[in-house]
Image: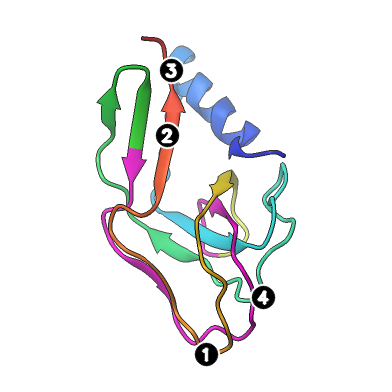
Amino acid sequence: MVLGPSTYLVDKWFRAAFMNASFVVAQAYIQLHTADPGASGTNAVATDNTRKAVTMAAPVITTGLVTISNSAQVQWTGLTAAQDASHYALFDALTTGNFLGSGLINANAYGIGDSLTFAVGDIDIALSCAS
């Protein structure tokens, strides 16, 4: 299983933190997957593969953990296949772009014509840190 930040993203973080390099993701996009997206975010892409913009709130810092969550609803409507989206991938562009990372989602199976909605706070990304 290859889940978490991508090598692209970690490289950019390190360069920004230790080499005075600027790095900004203007907009992140989330894509549905039916299994682990793999190291490049291209495996097991759901049939309904339209990426949706995801806006994140400010990080919340607790002992040993930094977490960010979506600050706006993310929704796919009129789904065209019956599947179970079990994973997500994040990118820095609506199409193509750079793979930022991946993770698990708790989603029920959906059918043709259904909608899949993540309410505010449903998408959480957490990283462990020194405590």
Q: Earlier in the sequence, mark 4 or mark 2?
A: 4
Q: Earlier in the sequence, mark 2 or mark 3?
A: 3
Q: CA distance from mark 4 to mark 1?
A: 13 Å
Query: In what quadrant of the picture does the N terminus appear?
Result: top right
Q: CA distance from mark 2 to mark 1?
A: 32 Å
Q: CA distance from mark 2 to mark 3?
A: 19 Å
Q: Earlier in the sequence, mark 3 or mark 1?
A: 3
**Marks 2 and 1 close (CB-CB < 8 Å):** no
Left or right for 98, reference 54: right
Residue on which the image places disc 1: 113
Query: In the rendered structure, which amino acid carries the disc numbered 1?
Result: Gly
**Marks 4 and 2 close (CB-CB < 8 Å):** no
At x 50%, y 56%, the residue is: 106
Query: In the rendered structure, which amino acid carries the disc numbered 2?
Result: Ala
Q: CA distance from mark 4 to mark 2?
A: 27 Å
Judged by depth in the image, the label closer to the viewer, 4 or 1, is: 1
SS label for mark 3: helix
In depth, the one of 92 and 110 nearer the eye is 110
| Label drawn at residue 47 | 4
At x 40%, y 72%, the residue is: 75
Left or right for 130, reference 10: left
Left or right for 26, reference 48: left
Tell whether position 79 is magenta: yes
Q: Magenta region: which residues? A: 68-94
**Marks 3 and 1 close (CB-CB < 8 Å):** no
Relative to 114, is 56 above or below?
above
Residue on which the image places disc 3: 17
The percent coordinates of residue 102 (x first, y second) are 58, 46
Q: Quadrant of residue 31?
A: bottom right
